[in-house]
Image (spheres, helix red, strand yellow):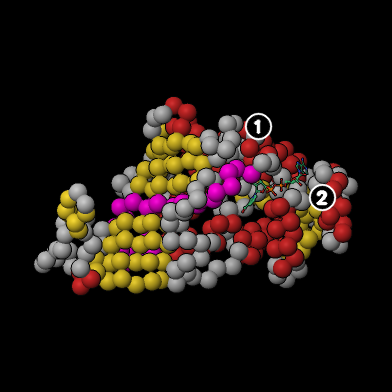
Amino acid sequence: MKKMKVAVVGYGGMGGWHVDRISQNDVAEVAGIYDIDPARCELAESRGIHVYASLEEVLADPSVELITVATPNDVHEEIAIAAMNAGKNVISEKPVTISLESLERMIAASERNGVKFSVHQNRRWDADFLAMKQLCDSGELGDVINIESRVHGSRGIPGDWRGVKKYGGGMLYDWGIHLIDQILMIFGFNPKRVSCICDYITNSECDDGFRLDIYFENGIRATVEVGTYNFINMPRWYLRAKGGSASIPAWKTPVDVVKCDKWQELNVTPVQTAAGLTKTMAPRDDYTTDTYKIELPKSDVHDYYRNFIRAIRGEEEQLITHDQMRMDLKVILAAFQSAETGTIVDIQ
Ligand SMILES: NC(=O)c1ccc[n+]([C@@H]2O[C@H](COP(=O)([O-])OP(=O)(O)OC[C@H]3O[C@@H](n4cnc5c(N)ncnc54)[C@H](O)[C@@H]3O)[C@@H](O)[C@H]2O)c1
């Protein structure tokens, strides 16, 4: 199969990642990059990458069928729409954009021009997420009660555009969009309401962390937490289900599972502390539980480009749909509203 030529607009940290991944892909190849910063263009040239002189030059290149937009969040829309109006298929980096009206204009441009439009939700290929999804889908631990998904860092919000509101800064947009998308992939793109509080520890303008509870119709509650001022991390994933608990302690560690085999215990040894004693909170006797590990599954993030390029060629359905893009963004916007008003916000 002939490889599809892809141009990358925005050659910063993530633009570089795209160029590397496209170069390794079996269905895509790099046509070149464009960046408004001459230093980034020089760097690309020094690496042997073709550099376009302007966005117009990218759009005028008939060999380019797909454009990946890897600029700060506030300019995804204008570049994506210009590209689609020029007949190019488009991948926007996440978050796809920063308002629902803007997203609707992007989707309309895709439909009007008969081109495909996707967002790079690459963390659907993270093995920790896939392991948790498989565990929930399998019913191995029975009905889910609640799940917690966290990422913790200790360096504050990056000191670039991510700390500036008008550029679409803040951790809800940066990491929240990945974690929300993963939760909706597990429990469905039909959440009912959200409640959110934001941190402003290292930045007064944009959230540098947050805790978001997402409620589903079936009673499941998902907690999504991002912290950038955590010097001790909590587990990456924590799951409570009717039949037991599971946890993924850190990036790339296997799933720890404790299945409750016998609800009743004969003799519980109480825990005695300096000020009292408790049976309720005492550890269970081993014979009542089955404790084991599940290795993380293998995944290949190249499947993101493979799928989208096959979708452009009409060979597959696009995995990340426009409706999913809408719901991911609706949850983020509802989370901001909840944090600002101190209320639980329904998802319309
Ligand atoms: N999917 C992921 O895992 C992931 C990870 C990191 C960043 N991102 C996303 O990628 C995008 C870029 O983030 P980054 O970390 O690479 O930022 P960055 O600051 O490192 O790079 C952005 C680049 O875009 C260029 N740029 C800005 N405006 C432009 C314009 N109008 N035309 C052309 N180039 C322009 C800048 O000069 C810069 O080189 C953001 O949307 C971010 O959320 C995604």
Comparing 88 with 291, the one in front is 291
Q: Dot 1: few (<14), some (14–19), or many (≥20) neighbours within 10 Å?
A: few
* Mark 2 within 8 Å of ligand 1, using the beta carbon: yes
Q: CA distance from mark 2 to mark 1?
A: 23 Å
Q: Dot 2: few (<14), some (14–19), or many (≥20) neighbours within 10 Å?
A: some
Task: Give the residue drawn at x 27%, y 71%.
Answer: 290
Comparing 108 with 325, the one in front is 325
Q: Which residue is mark 1?
A: 166
- Indicate the position of residue 228 as horizontal and vertical percent values: 54, 46
Task: Give the residue drawn at x 78%, y 61%.
Answer: 30
Q: Quadrant of residue 295?
A: bottom left
Q: Quadrant of the C terminus?
A: top left
Task: Give the residue drawn at x 10%, y 67%.
Answer: 266
- Indicate the position of residue 26 as horizontal and vertical percent values: 70, 70
First to last magenta residue range: 135-158
Q: Quadrant of the N terminus?
A: bottom right
Asked whether the viewer can see residue 130, the reply is: no
| Mark toward the start of the polypeptide (2 vs 1) | 2
149 within the magenta span: yes
Disc count in the image? 2
- Indicate the position of residue 132 as horizontal and vertical percent values: 42, 61
Q: Residue furthest left?
A: 266
- Say whether residue 257 is left or right of residue 283: right
Q: Is residue 120 above or below residue 265?
A: above
Q: Is residue 90 above or below residue 31?
A: above
User: Which secondary structure lies at badge 2?
Assistant: helix
Q: Which residue is mark 2?
A: 40
